[in-house]
Image (cartoon, rainbow, N blue to C red):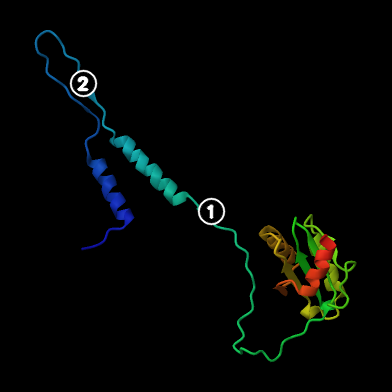
Amino acid sequence: MKIKNNTTIFIEIFLTLKNTTMAEMIVQEKKGARQKKNPIRVDMTPMVDLGFLLITFFMFTTNFTKPNVMDLGLPAKDPNPNPINIPYIDHLNQVTFILGKDNKVFYHQSNEKELTANNLKETDFSGVQISKIISEAYSKAPKKDIFTVIIKPTDDANYKNFVDVLDNIAISKKERYGITDIKPWEKKVYENVTK
């Protein structure tokens, strides 16, 4: 026994409806001098036929919306559980973005000893501000081949801001970026600035 697919079932229903009789008029013979009215019976087959044709037309011509996705280029998993050669990236070869609450974003190019409330600068998502900051940091980097953008969302950050930063990284055409948690020393300075 063959299992019929939806197309085969649809075609069989269509042909069954098509083979039924079209509009009929029931004609009665005259009886006597008085002529009786002929009752008219309207067959709905042509309308059903047209309905199925429209349904199939729209089924085959409709494009379903595809979800917009962003490609995250993640590195391959290291087969060695204890990595030996961990690359060190100097603070001058990176720019760090800290995503805060109320759509605020802060950035710095400092290490633990140098980061102060004056070094942690605030910017916003208007225009291409973040792309401009990335380009400026890249132009000042001593080793441009290992320049990295680091994103550190806080607990108060929202997902939209995270995606906006990733979009700005894509606009600036930088392929090396990392996503990590905010360090305790950065959190301390961040909390002092946002008070």
Image marks 1 and 2: residues in contact by CB distance under 8 Å:
no
Disc 1 from disc 2: Cα separation: 50 Å
Q: Nearer the viewer, residue 105 or 147?
A: 105
Instruction: Look at label 1 and name its amino acid.
Output: Thr
Q: Residue at x 9, y 13 (%)?
A: 31
Q: Quadrant of the C terminus?
A: bottom right
Quadrant in which residue 180 is drawn: bottom right
Q: Give the answer, above or below, for where 76 lies relative to 124.
A: below
> Looking at the image, which residue sits at the far bottom?
84
| Residue hosting label 2 | 39
Q: Residue at x 87, y 78 (%)?
A: 113
Residue 160 appears at what percent x and percent y? 68, 58
Instruction: Look at label 2 and name its amino acid.
Output: Pro
Q: How many marks?
A: 2
Viewer-nearest of discs 1 and 2 = 1
Residue 120 appears at what percent x and percent y? 85, 67
Q: Quadrant of the N terminus?
A: bottom left
Q: Nearer the viewer, residue 120 or 5?
A: 120
